[in-house]
Image: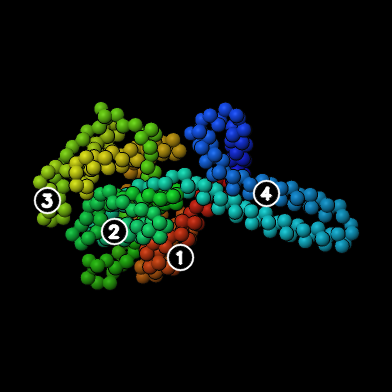
Amino acid sequence: MLGELEALERRFEELLLELAKPEIFSDQSRLQELLKEKASLEDVVCKFRDYKRILGEIEEAESLLREERDPEFQKFLKGELSRLRERREELERELQEALLRKEEGEFQEAIMEIRAGVGGEEASLFARDLFRMYTRYAHSRGWEVELVSKTETELGGFKEVIFKIKGRGAYERLKHERGVHRVQRVPITEAGDRIHTSTATVAVLRKPSEIEIKLNPEDLRIETFRAGGPGGQHMQKNETAVRVVHIPTGLSVVCRDERSQYQNKMRALEILRARLYELERRKREEDLSRERRSQVGTGERAEKIRTYNFPQKRVTDHRIGLTLYDLERILDGELDELLDALALRERRSKG
């Protein structure tokens, strides 16, 4: 954490020097950009400077205490040290929260994809439950949820559902949800009381800008076909559904839920751009050359990141060893306790 804070402080000082230059006022666009960045850093930098001052005062008080022989002054110094150490711990918590808020404000939009894994129809129903959970969580944060594409089963489950969540910090908040989610319960399709284990995979993608990921038209194969719902009762007469294939990687996106071919094409290109960005991110950060599916694995039960156990009303996140006996509340979208713990783990891993 200290290295990141020192880098932010250096950047803050650079901004002050830039803003002090007379010529900056002739470029209002640049001026506003610098002022906005300065405002985003000011809170965390001020807290960091306060934190460094407290560390200096603690060091000074400890040095004095080692040398002091007067019992009364020793008592005073010990009381002062206790106060300073409490303030240090308080500032450490505030700095962690400030850094998280800064990160959460950077990426405004997440693209989420949920797919049924192992477990047949029950896995599809679980995928629907996860979609509902994330939708309710998004609404509780004041975020907007926009459905992109879905493939339903006869019982109302989802073989696949793709949706966007728009709002401050959506991607940064939800990125830890990627992986295999496991459910243990008696399926509605089960005649007896036998508990089944099923899975669904969740992918969380950051929506990149067109500048970050440029799509070469020569690398795309665009196909159109008729869009129809379950049972084919409302089959479109026109070819409004669109499939976009990225030839170099083999990635394919299908969008069929919009009314026009153009809208479906734009949606498909947006999802493709996000998938390509994720592919590049993994290559850079994890030195992987596997295709996009590696983000969530194969959906096998042993790869789970979290288990939702209905008989025990238990949710366990296996990455951090956190178990909460509040299944219904979590599935209703109250995810903050889990997400806070995951964010804190990430912060600690960065030092």
Distance in Å between CA atoms under marks 1 and 2: 22 Å
Secondary element at image label 4: helix
Q: Name the disc covering residue 128, or none.
A: 2
Q: Which residue is mark 1?
A: 324
Distance in Å between CA atoms under marks 3 and 2: 23 Å
Query: Is 335 placed left or right of 129 in the picture?
Result: right
Q: Is residue 188 above or below residue 70?
A: below
The residue under the point 28% across, 51% down is 147
Residues at marks 3 and 2 touching, judged by CB atoms closer than 8 Å: no
- Image location of residue 214, percent across then percent down: 34, 31
Secondary element at image label 3: loop
Badge 3 or badge 4: first in the primary sequence: 4
Is 47 or 218 nearer to us in this picture? 47
Badge 3 or badge 2: first in the primary sequence: 2
Residues at marks 3 and 1 touching, judged by CB atoms closer than 8 Å: no
Q: Is disc 2 surrounded by few (<14), some (14 to 19) or many (20+) residues within 10 Å? A: many
- Image location of residue 166, percent across then percent down: 37, 49
Camera-side mark, 1 or 2: 2
Q: Name the disc covering residue 132, or none.
A: none
- Image location of residue 19, percent across then percent down: 59, 34
Q: Which residue is mark 3?
A: 235
The amino acid type of the residue labelled 2 equals Arg
